[in-house]
Amino acid sequence: MPELPEVETQVCDLQAVIGRKILAIKSDTPKSFVPALPTFRRKVVGQKIVTVRRRAKFIIFEFASGDRLVAHLRMTGHFLLAKSAAPLEKFVRHSFQLSGDKLWLQFSDIRKFGTLRFFRSDQKIPELEKLGPEPLERKFTKKVLAARLAARRGKLKAVLLDQTFLAGIGNIYADEICFAARLHPSSKVENLKPKEVEKLWAAIRSQLKKGVKNRGTTIGEFVDAHGRPGCNQKTLRVYRRAGSRCFVCGAVLQKMKISQRTTTFCVRCQRVV
DNA sequence: TAAATCCTGTCA
DNA sequence: TGACAGGATTTA
């Protein structure tokens, strides 16, 4: 679930850990750590957090030493801020005890796909090197999108989901972006006209900004670091609405698989190009 | 380019 | 009981 807006929401809340040292790490799911937990613990315990930021769907904790802890929430992961060591949710897998006033950073993750990785200050983070631009940054202009699209072929939704093309979009926002741009998700990007690229650019920006403003989409279990759900789900137009009627034209929404992902769209509103 | 994989929960 | 779920990598 967590896509750019959900990760951004988490990072915003996690500013509360800045200036704290990690005193101890407890985990019942050691598989999530790279390197393995004993080494990870040796490298991380005692380090002071100086920044917490987002890149694509990654959360990067930077330490005073320059070393970094890179977390990925995958499908069901999320951080929680707790005032005691007691787990705030049933599926808390890891817990970081922090220095200062009582504060624990917990990591809840039903499906255990989330990852926590350690990198020394002089190490490159290969996954970050390969990422495409941040869609909400100023320098991601219509021109940038047009230039990147010109170098690609294939189905629009598959391209939107590709993190090396653009960073941070997942299944929910990909469907909503296609609908907002009135483009069918299986449109071929090589066929997009300048007008359509412009609509696509505007849709990417507006849908992601809306998601951030609404503090994420909660379908199932996403919550912010205080355990509160987001409210972007109330604004969804197509995602998971197959079989229901389009809010715009009343046609029954259809679904298909693109890149192995369920894709919902309106045949009447969204044009195949 | 598609399928299998990592897990566990929910819903039909 | 089986299909499906927000992600991304690995393998064929």
Image (spheres, coloured by chain):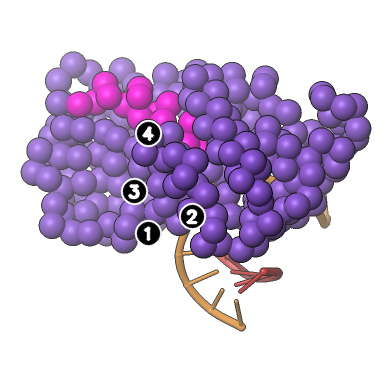
Chain colours: A purple, B red, C orange
Marks 1 & 2, CB-CB < 8 Å contact: no
Q: CA distance from mark 1 to mark 2?
A: 14 Å
Q: Residue furthest right?
A: A251
Q: Is residue A44 magenta?
A: no
Q: Check disc 4 and give the amino acid type.
A: Arg
- Which label was assigned to residue A148? 2
Segment colored magenta: A1-18
Q: Earlier in the sequence, mark 3 or mark 2?
A: 3
Q: Check disc 2 and give the amino acid type.
A: Arg
Q: Earlier in the sequence, mark 1 or mark 3?
A: 3
Q: Where is mark 1, residue-wise? A: A130
Q: Where is mark 4, residue-wise? A: A138
- Which label was assigned to residue A116? 3
Dot 3 falls on which chain?
Answer: A
Q: Report whether residue A162 is seen.
A: no
Q: Check disc 1 and give the amino acid type.
A: Lys
Q: At 57% from the left edge and 49% from the top edge, which residue is drawn?
A: A160
> In the figure, A112 relative to A91: above or below?
below
